[in-house]
Image (cartoon, grey):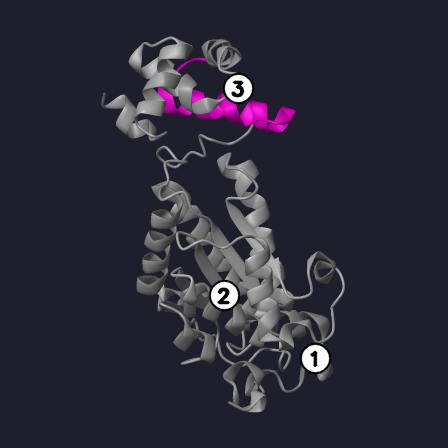
Amino acid sequence: MNLGALVSESRNPETMDLDALSTLEMVTRFNQQDATVAQAVKATLPQVAQAVDAAAVALLAGGRIIYMGAGTSGRLGILDAAECPPTFGVSHDLVVGLIAGGPGALLKAVEGAEDNPQFGEQDLREINLEARDLVVGLAASGRTPYVLGGLAYARSCGCTTVAISCNPDSAIARAADIAISPVVGPEALTGSTRLKSGTAQKLVLNMLSTGAMVKFGKVFQNLMVDMKATNAKLVDRACRMLMEATGAPRERAEALLAQTDYEVKPAILMELAGLDAVTARARLAEHRGYLRAALQG
């Protein structure tokens, strides 16, 4: 499809006068456009749920979630991947972000890097892609060669693949097992897909990684109980999580966390099941880290 024919590249009739508006009028117009994004994402929730389930299957099989994209889409994937270790206590190689042009493209565009499908395959080969991995291709346009090359290689390896784009029936949607296509319409600034399209992709990525981690046992109730308490703020958060999950007073919570090196999950199990730290860790291991299951015996 011709780039100019894409919904994400067309002109928005509601913002044709951006350069003539007052500042307040201009930002109001931006906000009005942004308000449509959540509804566009809502229409894709069945596909998002499929992707969450596929991601959980990959993780439980010992695989990884791998994001790949160019430009804004690539940066969003890397951002989501980078936030998983501190939030969920997972290793840095469990959720991986790849961007066309390599790490340098995070800060400065690498011209032409996204135009070669072989680069997508090459980047996946370099991280030793396996069939149990989930590969998520991100492209607002839905036609980025780097992403198409990566998805084609991933499918040839037996991986489940997901495409996230903001144009209907896009090339990457047709190339993937699961297609998530929130159609947010023309951007307020023509073709600037860091705006509504970027916001839509961020919303989908938030649900995908968080939902997968819930299913992977990294969440109890709505608490991030595998969070790493690596600074004073997070130590305090760990203490508050333990108090909220168990009803323990602060002094008791602090004493429990001191016995678990500030790991929240075994501390909750100690308090609610009356276990010592060693037994709590063993029980969690028996239940593959699922705290709710460990509490049930």
Residue at the extreme left: 296
Mark 2 crowdedness (10 Å alpha carbons): few <14, some 14-19, many ≥20 = many
Question: Residue 3, position in %: x, y?
Answer: 57, 87
Q: How far apart are marks 3 and 1 (CA)?
A: 53 Å
- Quarter assignment of residue 174: bottom left
Q: Whole-percent x and y of residue 275?
A: 34, 10
Neighbourhood count class around disc 1 (C-alpha, 10 Å): few under 14, some 14–19, many 20 upward:
few
- Chain part drawn in magenta: 229-249
Q: Could you tell me if the residues under marks 2 and 3 are in contact, i.e. CB atoms within 8 Å?
A: no
Closer to the N terminus: mark 2 or mark 1? 1
SS class, disc 1: loop
Q: Is tag 3's residue or tag 1's residue first in the polypeptide sequence? A: 1
Instruction: Point out which mark residue 230 bears.
Output: none
- x%, y% of residue 1? 51, 89
Q: Give the residue at mark 2.
A: 137
Which quadrant of the figure has residue 199?
bottom right
Which residue shows up at 66% across the image and 86% down it?
17
Q: Which of marks 2 and 3 is in front?
A: 2
